[in-house]
Amino acid sequence: ISMHTNLDAAEGGVNDTLAHTLGLEDIGAFENPLSMGRIGFIRPACSLADFLPKVYRLLGVSFLRYIDGKRPVSKVAVGSGNCSELWKFALAAGCDTFVSGDFKYGQLQPASEIGLNIIDAGHFATENVICKPLAKLISNAFPSLDVSVSERHKDCIRLYTE
């Protein structure tokens, strides 16, 4: 049984966990055709330059791609995995920042012109946040089971640098 998309959208699922991991407050639904993602607030508002290292550290990534929309980070939309196509809905909802993964250049370039901060934290990192909470939930529900999160489970994407 695979409940991948259901877990993304479910209360307490991937997107709720992603929003909480990033320290968002007053988290609510992100209205869009896929009913995916969440919107919350960073309090107090901060600069993108201050928010980026926080995202980097909290998600445990080796890189972030971003667009500086020249706005402070306050109202943030998140969409785990490949929700990058929802950036227009984040903008329409009044968000100044959108965190997701798998952005294409054609999505990033227009966002930079209209003042939306975008943080591409990668598909893996924006979904992997659910693994430990899900293991804990399963372990609590079935105390006789030995539940653990694989230590070999890693992002398949590697970076080459010279």
Image (cartoon, rainbow, N blue to C red):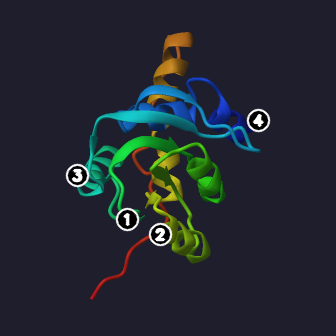
Q: Where in the figure is residue 89, as x and y percent of width and height?
A: 64, 49
Mark earlier in primary sequence (4, 1): 4
Disc 4 crowd rating (10 Å Cα; few below 14, some 14-19, many 20+) is few
Q: Mark 3: which secondary structure?
A: helix
Q: Mark 4: which secondary structure?
A: loop
Marks 4/3 in contact by CB < 8 Å: the verdict is no
Residue 68: numbered disc: 1
Up-down: is 61 above or below 109? above
Marks 2/1 in contact by CB < 8 Å: the verdict is yes
Mark earlier in primary sequence (2, 4): 4
Measure how far apart labels 2 and 4 are at the Cα level: 40 Å
Q: Of the residues shown, which amino acid type is indicated by label 1?
A: Asp
User: Which residue is located at x 32 percent, y 50 percent?
Assistant: 72
> Which residue bears the numbered disc 4?
1
> Which residue bears the numbered disc 3?
50
Q: Where in the figure is residue 42, as x and y percent of width and height?
A: 34, 36
Q: Of the residues shown, which amino acid type is indicated by label 2?
A: Ser
Q: Of the residues shown, which amino acid type is indicated by label 4?
A: Ile
Disc 1 crowd rating (10 Å Cα; few below 14, some 14-19, many 20+) is some
> Which residue bears the numbered disc 2?
112
The picture quadrant where one finds residue 62 is bottom left
Marks 2/4 in contact by CB < 8 Å: the verdict is no
Is residue 153 among the parts visible in the rendering?
no
Quadrant where the image shows the N terminus: top right
User: Which residue is located at x 71 percent, y 43 percent?
Assistant: 32
Up-down: is 73 above or below 1? below
Residue 123: numbered disc: none
Mark earlier in primary sequence (2, 3): 3
Mark earlier in primary sequence (4, 3): 4
